Image (cartoon, rainbow, N blue to C red):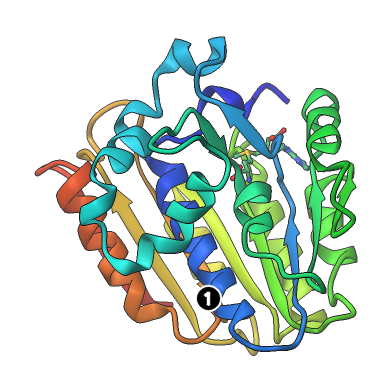
Amino acid sequence: MNYRHLFHAGNRADVMKHAVLALALTRLAAKDKPFRFIDTHGGIGLYDLQADAARKTLEAEGGVKALWRHRHEAPEAFAPYLSAIAGINAADDCRYYPGSPAVALSQLRAADKAIINELHPDDAHSLASWARHDKRLKITRQDAWAALVSLVPPPEKRGLVLIDPPFEKTTEWNDLVTAMEKALPRWNGGSYLIWYPIKMNSSEDQAIAALGAIPKLPESWRMEWCWQSQNEPGLSGNGLVLVNPPYPLVDSLQKILTWLHDTLGSQTGRISLNRL
Ligand code: SAM
């Protein structure tokens, strides 16, 4: 396990993923009944963008720092995400960055719960330390694919699973599809948000087709934002598969994509939103 999210926190991929996550959770919180958030690959929860790791890559510069400068022009769909960032920072600052557990925490009500799973020993330790004061948060340290299957269905029967692998192993797409094939029959009513990277020669199409072929798959969408041409080296963009997204959400996804492309993207990039 080489991947450490502290080198990448607040980059363009995090901005898209966390803006959608925050908005999806506000939709779940719009109904009275409690919900559960499950994070299969949690990271450490909260990130200091002035720490050495973040300063080494400067990935947040083109991501959350650029978004923060333009935040007053951002569409309403970004409001829950912006408020998650504002909630952990001094006024007008964005030194601290909310990872997915902290984005989720910003949306939890008194009766909602979150289970955050992280396998890396150091990151699991940091995560547990960040979460220790809030009884709504439970930290587990399992392999994500076993966790995904064993944690559903939650007792609340309402909720969302974020699946955010590092994609450092060639087996991860296969593992993800296999785990989804097992999880979906157990909890068909849940929402699932699956993040993936887009690079030169990356091979997401086949795996996403396999997800689309899962029997009785609820309504599902695929959204992608590339901030640069896929012929350039490095991470060119990212995507989310949204299985059974909370309602209403899909209309806002196009607004998020268009604004990201126009404000944080480039002319060689692209956006797309399609039903699976
Ligand atoms: N979801 C986090 C966020 O948005 O703030 C970022 C997660 S990061 C992309 C992926 C995380 O998955 C890393 O912290 C890594 O240690 C963890 N990880 C890698 N393989 C794992 C596995 N098999 N099971 C659980 N966690 C794993």
Q: Position of residue 209 (x, y in %)?
A: 49, 69
> Residue at left 86%, top 75%?
154
Of residues 99 and 228, the one nearer the viewer is: 99
**Could you say which is closer to the camera, residue 185 or residue 34?**
34
Left or right placement of residue 231 versus residue 31 in this view: left
Q: Is residue 198 visible?
A: no
Q: Nearer the viewer, residue 124 or 242?
A: 124
Q: Quadrant of the C terminus?
A: bottom left
Rendered residue at 47%/43% (across/down): 14
User: Which residue is farthest front?
Assistant: 91
Residue 101 in percent (x, y) is at: 68, 49
Task: Determine whether, in the image, residue 22 is placed left or right of residue 16.
Answer: right
Residue 54, position in %: x, y? 50, 19
Q: Residue at x 33, y 27 (%)?
A: 61
Residue 232, x across and y down, in percent:
24, 30
189 shown above or below 89:
below
Q: Is mark 1 within 8 Å of ligand 1?
A: no
- Residue 232, compared with residue 225, is above or below; it is above
Residue at screen point 74% across, 52% down: 40
Find disc 1 in the rendering and name its residue: 212
